[in-house]
Image (cartoon, coloured by chain):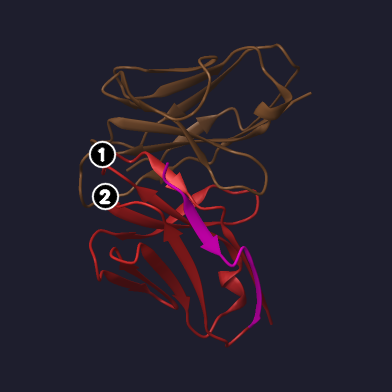
Chain colours: A red, B brown
Amino acid sequence: ELKVEQNPLFLSMQEGKNYTIYCNYSTTSDRLYWYRQDPGKSLESLFVLLSNGAVKQEGRLMASLDTKARLSTLHITAAVHDLSATYFCAVDLDSNYQLIWGAGTKLIIKP
Amino acid sequence: ETGVTQSPTHLIKTRGQQVTLRCSSQSGHNTVSWYQQALGQGPQFIFQYYREEENGRGNFPPRFSGLQFPNYSSELNVNALELDDSALYLCASSLSPGSFTDTQYFGPGTRLTVL
């Protein structure tokens, strides 16, 4: 059974700092996604990572994928308050959009 | 381009009742997936419909059922509601399974409370 583990599950940090969220998964996967969820809201797609060594960046967020290590990271650079949200990684085993999700990382960025 | 819409936004039911949730997929998408998200947890895959046929199912009992219509909109039906069914139900639309460059787009969700 595929397991997706995120850590940390909770992260409180100051504005301007850098930090990394980790996503480990237990079996080979074709695709890995990162989503953002604000409280009481739906899920917003951030990144789709399709191959080993893939790196994508959008603003202060950068995601990478190491399929050999079964590890993805979401790096936050010079955090700002607007990035406060819960971040989920999700794995798509067979490229069929049937995603298996991590438990989420709740990120709070203090001014 | 229209986004994914869901109705109703909120719903309160009692144990044993039945509920139907609705989803309209994004224009051009023929695949709809349904997820259950309990409070403080990640979403759990319920099932997926592709061109009106069920195309995969997660670990949910048969009282969770669905439909997809010719216009690719979809319904999720839950019979014999239990307290643990209280959750946010999300639908997501996407291109055909196996499309390599796209992602799923999520609707705003239906918050179901079972009393």
Q: Is residue A78 left or right of residue A107?
A: left
- The residue that mark 1 highlights is B95
Identify the subunit bearing mark 2. B
Report the disc number at residue B102.
2
At x 51%, y 57%, the residue is A5
Q: Amino acid at mark 1?
A: Leu
Tell me the chief SS of the magenta region: strand
Q: Position of residue B115 (x, y in %)?
A: 79, 23
- The image shows residue A35 at horizontal and vertical percentages of 46, 56
Residue at (20%, 44%) from the top-left corner? B99
Q: Are marks 2 and 1 on the same chain?
A: yes
Image mark for residue B21: none
Query: Which tag, 2 or 1, sits closer to the chain's start?
Result: 1
Helix, strand or loop status at disc 2: loop
The segment highlighted magenta reads A1-14
* Marks 2 and 1 close (CB-CB < 8 Å): yes
The disc labelled 2 sits on which kind of residue?
Asp
Badge 1 marks a residue whose secondary structure is loop
Camera-nearest residue between A84 and A53: A53
Q: Determine the residue positioned at 48% across, 83% down.
A: A77
Q: In this rendering, is residue A12 above or below B64?
A: below
